[in-house]
Amino acid sequence: MAMEVSDQEQSSQALDLEEITRKISFLDKWREIFSYHRLGSNNPAPQKLRESLFGNTVHVFSQEWKKACFRFHDPFSDLAFALEVGKGGARSIQMAVQGFIIKYLVFTREGRDCHFHPLVAISKQEQERALAAVLADILWAAGEAQKATLCLVTEETYVASTADHSRDDFTERLQLFEFLKKEATEKFIYDHLQCFKGEASHGVILFLYSLIFSRTFERLQNDLDVSTAHLLQSNAGGFLCRQAVVNMILTGRASPNVFNGCQNGKSQELLHGVLARSDIGYLQWGKDTSQDDRLSQVGSMLKTPKLPIWLCNISGNDSVLYSTNRQLLSDWKMERLFDLYFYSGQPSQKKPARLTIDTHSHHWERNQRDDEHRPGRRFSPVEMVIRTKWREATINWNGTVPFF
């Protein structure tokens, strides 16, 4: 009997050792891909963060910024794929992320035929999976596919207020989580999604902080040039995103300009543009934009992305154009007659507008285009931004009242 008990004890001890070994191995595995640390009182990161954003450590975000988060429209609605966006500078970030959400839902997600009605009947769970995947993708690209950093807010305050540092009771409570694998980044975001989409979560600011930490201050300084010393610019009592923020989301690099490669400025200073095609493109049009200003013209890297999705800046307002046809930009025959969908983010828009684009020239269409530019003719800025990509296009709104 004693021998049986002894054998059972040994067996139990062996199992305990196996369990301990398994748990240690599990922890070691997570240590390889995950670590976290607080921004302590002696850590210069909060000051560097403020300087990177505002150019000083005194300015703080406005209430519009603080209220901005990543919240979808109702599931299973015509806009179930779309984020609710507000006013102010955070809108640029929300609409850029919106482009990646469309990419995920139309071209990336598995287990569904995305070509037919890809954005109809989106459930709450699909919305959340899309948002987690997209935020992880963007941060991973900013970290050059090596590391991503997530910023969350804790209850404790780690940074004291000084004469040179204005507290916002938010930045002082940051905790950083670093990941060495994209899958772990996505899972962590999914498990903490309320921190980015919840009311009063400061979700957009948290994502912007995470983007900067993922990019690193050193890489950020190398990305920028003499035209852009910091990422936000003051405007009417608030702050707008400079092009470097938009490009950091779209391409992973905080390039301050929209042209291809590098160019010399008016004083022969070296200016940094976009170095490679990205999945999501960018178009811009403004009535005061000069066609002769080569430095303000969007280059082919952004005009012709890998997928037919464009963030559009139309007279300072951000929106998204997209096609559900993956082949649109890889087969010139597809670009003769095709549909684009337009989402403005405005509260008045209840479903995406379907526009039919015809780039095949006919003599009666040329006459119509000449007529469009007669004195007093009102034209839609949406049509004008489309023509920065397809210059001779005619646009049919298919019964939708054109957006002005």
Image (spheres, helix red, strand yellow):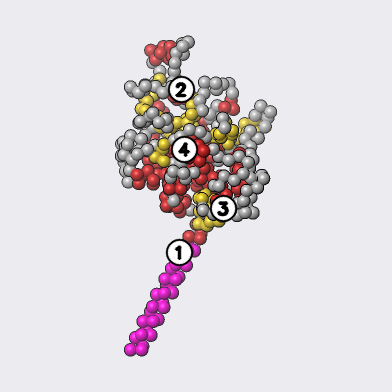
Q: Which residue is mark 4?
A: 94
Which of the two discs, 1 and 3, labels the residue nearer the N terminus?
1
**Around disc 2, counting alpha carbons within 10 Å, would you say few (fewer than 14), some (14 to 19), or many (20 or more)?**
some
Residue 381 marker: 2
Q: Quadrant of residue 336?
A: top left
Q: CA distance from mark 1 to mark 4?
A: 36 Å
For the residues carrying marks 2 and 4, which lies nearer the camera in this image?
A: 4
**Around disc 4, counting alpha carbons within 10 Å, would you say few (fewer than 14), some (14 to 19), or many (20 or more)?**
many
Q: Which residues are magenta?
A: 1-29
Q: Using the image, determine if residue 52 lies above or below residue 37.
A: above
For the residues carrying marks 2 and 3, which lies nearer the camera in this image?
A: 3
Which of the two discs, 1 and 4, labels the residue nearer the N terminus?
1
- Dot 3: element: loop
Image quarter of the C terminus = top left
Q: CA distance from mark 2 to mark 3?
A: 47 Å
Kind of residue indicated by mark 2:
Pro
Q: Name the one closer to the observer, 378 or 102.
A: 378
Q: Which residue is mark 1?
A: 26
**Around disc 1, counting alpha carbons within 10 Å, would you say few (fewer than 14), some (14 to 19), or many (20 or more)?**
few
Q: Which residue is mark 3?
A: 157
Pointer 2 with pointer 1, Cβ within 8 A? no
Which of the two discs, 2 and 3, labels the residue nearer the N terminus?
3
Residue 197 left/right relative to 228:
left
Is residue 13 magenta-colored?
yes
Pointer 2 with pointer 3, Cβ within 8 A? no
Q: CA distance from mark 2 to mark 1?
A: 56 Å
Report x, y in % for residue 40.
Answer: 60, 54
Residue 247 left/right relative to 194:
right
